[in-house]
Amino acid sequence: MTNSLLLLGEALFYFGSMAVLFRLRRAIGIGVFMCAVGVMHFLETYLASTFYVELPFGMVSPGSAVLFSGKLVMLLLLYMKEDARTVRQPIYGLLFGNTLMIGLVLLLRLHEVAPLPSGQVADIGFVDQMGWLMVWGTTLLYIDAILIILLYEKLGHHLGRFRFARILASVAAILTFDQVGFFAALHFVAGAPLEVFFGGWAAKMAAAAVYSALLCAYLRVFEKRYEARPREIADVFHALTYRERYEALVEQAGRDSLTGLLHRGRFEDIGRERVARARDEGRPLSLLIVDADHFKSINDRYGHAEGDRVLKMVADELRRAVETDDQVFRIGGEEFAVLSPYPHAVARLLAENIRERIRFAGITPNLSVSIGIASLDERPGGLAALFALADERLYAAKAAGRDRVVGQAPAGTSPADEAGASRPEANRA
């Protein structure tokens, strides 16, 4: 009975202390709470491997039943009242910190240790014994922390109004999963008997009930701020695993640094995919190539800084006209491409709209653009054939005086004739 009361007292002390730090997070910073959550992981693992007390239903370690269970509840609290981007910081901090500790211990073993004057010599043998438990425990903690949040959100669609049941089910399920995983390693490393598993599981279920009740009481009394509705599991998982950061890096790597538009490499990849899909599904697709007229004279007269500003403004007008980023590309110095999911006639209207917008946007005196259009049903082949046809028509627009849209050759004229027999590069400026 004494051991049971002591374990309950330890749980109350742990939760009360951590709740105070969490409540003061606006005043002292959330980092204090996060550090307090993480600092006891070594103690948890050490107690779980060596320190057990006898209870009526088996042998129990305060490291697992009190400290580890409390840590998971604290991470859940952090997620509930902050967000996934905040709670992932201690999750990954714990993973990295414990991995770093294990690596440093391996290096410390290489030292020739000098004894103290009293003859005492440091013994890191207990760390050797705990090494595999630390590795396995750290991995389990990482998995547990993510799973408990995902399960909490999943149950929100079914138990949204029953907060205690939702929290208890999440905590109990993940602690059961953890007990199975950790006992397997504990049995292999330290030869823990089966009664340790059942005793530890019963204690964790009791801890789940106590901590869930304490968490609900804390939320009811101190955190009355509106709680968000259940979020999509995929969105939460992406945030917890930094997936959105990875996708942002990939996306940023495919963008032009000046205008923010997708660059030529992305045009090739996306364009080939859309052409193939449009042909397979029998859907329309048109390509517009947009080129700023007399752009070289802007650089020569006003300088390259003004030229860069003009390109940014042209890119902004293209975005507004098309209304989506993934259809607009910067494919050259002052040359842009638009992939339009419309037939030729509608794409022609879009091109005229783009020309008018830029002409009257006041970007720079008399700035205009020339546009060549090609549609998928005009020429067999892939993206290269479509691009070649649109490019020929862009040359034709330039040769005809600029500030115009060319979408097809005049009757009886081939695209080559339309573009002109001689097309020096300077003619496109």
Image: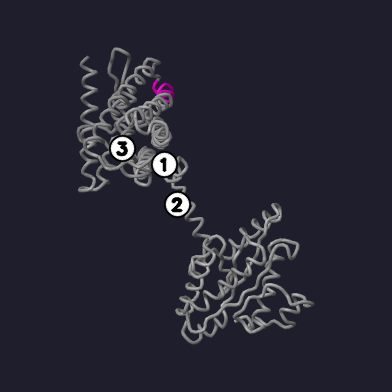
Q: Spot the residue most to the top.
A: 56
Label 3 amino acid? Leu
Give, as a three-letter code, the residue at label 1.
Answer: Arg
How many numbered circles does the render carry? 3
State the residue position of label 2. Answer: 245
Q: What stretch is highlighted in magenta?
A: 183-190
Question: Which SS class for mark 1?
Answer: loop
> Is residue 110 something that shows in the picture?
no
Alpha-carbon neighbours of circle 3 within 10 Å: few (<14), some, or many (≥20)?
A: many
- Front residue of 47/395: it is 395
Q: x%, y% of residue 6?
A: 21, 21
Label 1 crowd bin: few (<14), some (14–19), many (20+), radius 10 Å? few
Q: Is residue 316 above or below residue 43?
A: below
Residue at the farthest right position = 412
Q: Nearer the viewer, mark 2 or mark 1?
A: 1
Q: Is residue 303 left or right of residue 14?
A: right
Q: Which quadrant of the rendered structure holds the C terminus?
A: bottom right
Q: Distance between the residues labelled 1 and 3?
A: 16 Å
- Discs 3/2, front: 3
